[in-house]
Image (spheres, rainbow, N blue to C red):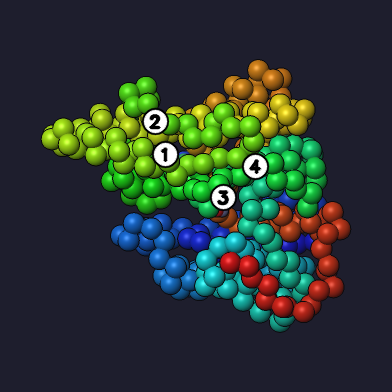
Amino acid sequence: MKVLGIESSCDETGVAVVDTEQGLLAHALHSQIAMHQAYGGVVPELASRDHIRRVIPLIHTVLSQSKLTLEDIDAVAYTAGPGLAGALLVGASVAQAFAWSHDLPTIPIHHLEGHLLSPMLADPVPEFPFVALLVSGGHTQIMQVDGVGQYKLLGETLDDAAGEAFDKSAKLLGLPYPGGPHLAKLAEKGDASVYDLPRPMKHSQDLDFSFSGLKTAVLTSLRKLEAEGAELSEEQRANLAASVQAAIVDVLGYKAIKAVKQSGLKRLVVAGGVGANLQLREFLSKEMAKLKGTVYFPPLNLCTDNGAMIAHAASERIKAGLTDLTNKHYDGSVRP
Ligand code: KG4
Ligand code: ZN
C-alpha cells in the first residue's frame, strides 16, 4: 500500500509517500523558520496560512519525485496532534478532502508516535523492544517501546521540554529562533566548565525531568555578568552556551542510560528535534557502547518535524493491523 503522509502541527509543512513494503519513496518539506524569525517564535496564525500555501505544491512534489499519481495512493495519514490547532486543521482538512474525493481511508497519527518511530527510517532499523528518549520542542519523555502502538511512559518533564530549555536559553543569549541549533553552534567555541549550571532532578529516584530552573540560572548568570558592567564578550556567550548544552545533555543522557539499565534492554532510540544535538549523540553513543548496547538516531534531516515520520508511522500501523482501513467517516479528529 502507498501511504501519503502530511505533517502540519507547527512550523514545518511536511509531505511524504511511504510504501508499506518498500519504505520511504519520497518526502518534501517547507520550513517556516525564516518567516517566524522576525517575531522570535512561531506565530500560530501565520503558520496556518503558510501551511495552506505550501501543502498542495508539496503533495505534487512528492508524487512527481516518486513517479506516482494521486490515483496510486491507497491511504492518507495526517498529524492529528498535539500541535497548534489552526495548523493541524490545515493538514487534517487537506488529508480528509483528498481521501474523501478518492474514497480512501484516513489515518490520524499522534505527532509523538511519528517522532518515536522515525529512527526506523535509518539504517540499521532498531528492533523492538527498545527504550526511547523523545526530546522535542514540546515534549521530553522516556518510554519503553515493545512494539508499534505499545508504549509505556517511564518518565517525562514536569515543566519545560528539553528543546524549550535550549530555545529559551538561546533567546536569553540573543540567538535567533529556533535557538537549539544556534546555541549548539555557539557552544562549539565555548568552555562548558566556566559556568556551573544546575542539573535539576538528575539524581531524583524517578525518570522525570525538570528544566525550568535552568533557564532561571542562565538569566541569573547573565544578570551577574551584566552587573559587572562591560558588554558580554563573544567568549563569555560561547562559554555560557556550552555550559547550558552540557547541563541539558548531562541530565538527558544520565536519565536515558538509567532507564536502559533499569529495563535490562540493550537498545536505546533517540527521537525528536533535540536528537539532532551532536553532543547528546556523542554522549549516548559512548555510554551505550560501555553497556555493549546500541543507540539509534533518526537521520539528521528527519529529527525535526517532517512528513516522512507521519507516513511511516501510518505504514507501521497498517502492517501491525492497528488501522481501520474501512474508516471512511472523516470525523476530522484533531487533538491540539
Ligand atoms: O521535534 P521538533 O522539530 O518539534 C517539536 O515537535 O517540538 O523539535 C524542535 C526542537 C526545538 O526546540 C529546537 O531548538 C530543537 O528541537 N533542536 C535542537 C537541535 N536541533 C533542533 N536542540 C539542540 N541541538 C540541536 N542541534
Ligand atoms: Zn515534533
Kind of residue at disc 3: His
State yes or no: discs 3 and 4 in contact (Cβ < 8 Å): no
Q: Earlier in the sequence, mark 2 or mark 3?
A: 3
The residue lying furthest to the front in this view is 205
Residue under pointer 4 = 155
State yes or no: discs 1 and 2 in contact (Cβ < 8 Å): yes
Q: Nearer the viewer, residue 220 or 82?
A: 220
Residue under pointer 3 = 139
Residue 290 higher or lower than 177, as above or below:
above
**Does mark 1 have its CB less than 8 Å from ligand 1?**
no
> Percent position (x, y) of residue 80?
64, 66
Q: Find the distance from the CA under tag 2 to the CA under tag 4.
A: 23 Å
Query: Which residue does the image show at 61% across and 44% down from the upper left?
Result: 156
Residue under pointer 1 = 214
The residue lying furthest to the top in this view is 290
Q: Earlier in the sequence, mark 2 or mark 4?
A: 4
Q: Find the distance from the CA under tag 4 to the CA under tag 1.
A: 19 Å
Q: Earlier in the sequence, mark 1 or mark 2?
A: 2
Relative horizontal placement of residue 74, taking residue 253 as reference (left or right) = right
Kind of residue at disc 2: Leu
Residue under pointer 2 = 197
Mark 1 element type: helix
